[in-house]
Image: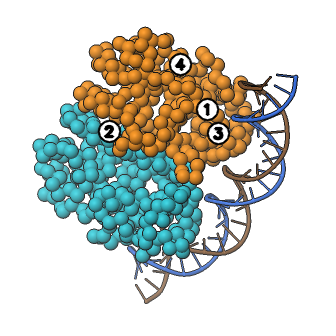
Chain colours: A orange, B cyan, C blue, D brown
DNA sequence: TTGGCTCGTTGATTCAGATCATAGCTGGAA
DNA sequence: TTCCAGCTATGATCTGAATCAACGAGCCAA
């Protein structure tokens, strides 16, 4: 699966004077900023915050960190898409979330990561040493509030996903997945249709608690019933979001 | 299902001078305090915090609030057990969590509750008007930090539950459920075995994404294999937590 | 150009859990 | 004490999704 370089995704920020170092503040150029943890910071705080960060890039399919690794950093995704997942000893895997620019990773209790994070596309992130991040949190009014608000949203999304995994049929799951991706694009001010799918059918299956074959059959059925149009295998249009939303919610 | 009054649960706090009003500070007597959002507060802050609260009791099987209700309050559970759930239009229901004393409810974005909360047993709670609670949060250092830490824990638990719902077999789900209840009891300094189950088989089924019959069969199988002992239908002993834990994690 | 990957789709068959049906148990009400 | 309603357990059957299998398309490397 190859993504068109300039379609359906936020552009990578332009190369910076001290890429992989500590440029003064490229935040002004960061397309993810307004959706990130750093959104409420004033100019001065933003500079202080960014000074703690190292900007990182990672190629598609690479692992950012693994479940069980000692947790030394937290991350703010600025470009690309990431999956976070947990696995059982025998290899069964559940993807618990797909992250988009502005999403935050690594917030954990304890001293090791509770899940694995992998790049679905080439990604860019701000990486913060966890102690510096914690200190900044406690010194900067509004930051914990912002993180709490983001965590609340994540918790609500997690509950929706539990309803999906526990009680929805295969077609309802796929419809819900597409709707929620579309909504997240729209919430970031980008078109909700068409959207590109940066993940494979196998990754969608691991997210929805299904197999590859069942996901494929659900796509086929939605396509034959006219609920979706597959321009390519990784590009979906929604002729009738309303009906799709009804399917997704079991209406 | 009747729970023995003084076994397996924290005792209800003794009747207070102004029950259902605003007593000065019974927090000293509150068995849930050290596990609650209020744990890190000093004596003075605790009194100010409690002054915002109304103490509430609710009978078994009553609804505290419903998905979609306008959200005016947040709650701190001090005694008993609560289920939180979401439902689809046709009645399919997913219980997303069982809350124990010290757990916090109602934290939500937007102006309505995103889930339904029901009393599994007679319960006692501290109820806070949401604006007063928010104001206290912003005025009291450490409170948002504490809530963020609680939300992180909930998020980690939610991810575990997604792995369960997406990828575990029926027996693994029931074993995981029992282990996690046992662990939560132990974390509160109470015995991890035997434990009482304040919920019906139907509620366990709605929590595990199964049917009543499948939950019942899984209990029977675990019992016949010697992994659990059912003293009564709502009281479980664990002769071998190690093996049960292995079953739960797919080992 | 060819060969060998991976990925996605589709068909045939199997199976874990859902559904349907029945019966025993328990606790509260009369 | 009896009765009844709700809960739990268990057997029989059904079914949605998993598994097993085959194949075509796209892509890269030789």
Question: Considering depth in this image, is D13 or B73 the residue closer to the camera?
Answer: D13
| Residue B30 image point, x, y percent | 20, 56
Q: Is residue B27 left or right of residue B187?
A: left
At 56% across and 70% down in the image, what residue appears?
B221
How far, Cα to Cα, is label 3 from label 4?
24 Å
Query: What label sits on residue A10 in the rendered view?
Result: 4
How far, Cα to Cα, is label 4 from label 1?
16 Å
Judging from the image, what secondary structure is the residue with disc 4 in?
loop
How far, Cα to Cα, is label 2 from label 3?
33 Å
Give the chain of mark 2.
B
Give the chain of mark 1.
A
Judging from the image, what secondary structure is the residue with disc 2 in?
helix
Q: Is residue A251 left or right of residue B176?
A: right
Give the chain of mark 4.
A
Q: Is residue C2 left or right of residue C18?
A: right
Task: Say above or below: A176 vs A42.
Answer: below
Dot 3 and dot 1 within a common chain: yes
Dot 1 and dot 2 within a common chain: no
> Hey, which quadrant is residue A22 in on the image?
top left
Question: Is the Cβ of the residue at disc 2 closer than 8 Å to that at disc 3?
Answer: no
Disc 4 residue crowd, few under 14, some 14–19, many 20+, Cα 10 Å: some
At 40% across and 27% down in the image, what residue appears?
A127
Query: What label sits on residue A199 in the rendered view?
Result: 1
Task: Say above or below: A50 vs A64.
Answer: above
């Amino acid at each position: 699966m190859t993504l068109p370089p300039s379609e359906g995704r936020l552009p990578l920020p332009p190369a910076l004077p001290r890429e992989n170092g500590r440029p003064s503040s490229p935040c002004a150029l960061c397309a993810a900023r307004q959706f990130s943890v750093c959104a409420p910071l004033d100019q001065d705080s933003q500079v202080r915050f960014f000074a703690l960060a190292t900007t990182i890039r990672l190629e598609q399919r690479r692992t950012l960190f693994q479940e069980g690794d000692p947790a030394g950093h937290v991350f703010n995704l600025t470009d690309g898409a990431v999956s976070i997942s947990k696995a059982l000893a025998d290899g069964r895997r559940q993807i618990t979330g797909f992250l988009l620019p502005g999403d935050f990773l690594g917030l954990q209790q304890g001293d090791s990561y509770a899940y694995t994070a992998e790049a679905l596309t080439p990604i860019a992130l701000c990486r913060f040493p966890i102690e510096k991040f914690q200190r900044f949190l406690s010194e900067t009014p509004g930051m914990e509030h912002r993180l709490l608000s983001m965590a609340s949203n994540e918790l609500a999304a997690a509950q929706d996903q539990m309803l999906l995994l526990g009680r929805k049929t295969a077609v309802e799951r796929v419809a819900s997945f597409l709707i929620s991706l579309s909504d997240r694009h729209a919430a970031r001010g980008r078109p909700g249709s068409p959207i590109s799918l940066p993940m494979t059918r196998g990754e969608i299956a691991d997210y929805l608690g299904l197999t590859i074959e069942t996901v494929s059959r659900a796509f086929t059925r939605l396509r034959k019933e006219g609920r979706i149009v597959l321009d390519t295998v990784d590009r979906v249009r929604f002729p009738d979001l309303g009906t799709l939303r009804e399917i997704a919610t079991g209406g």
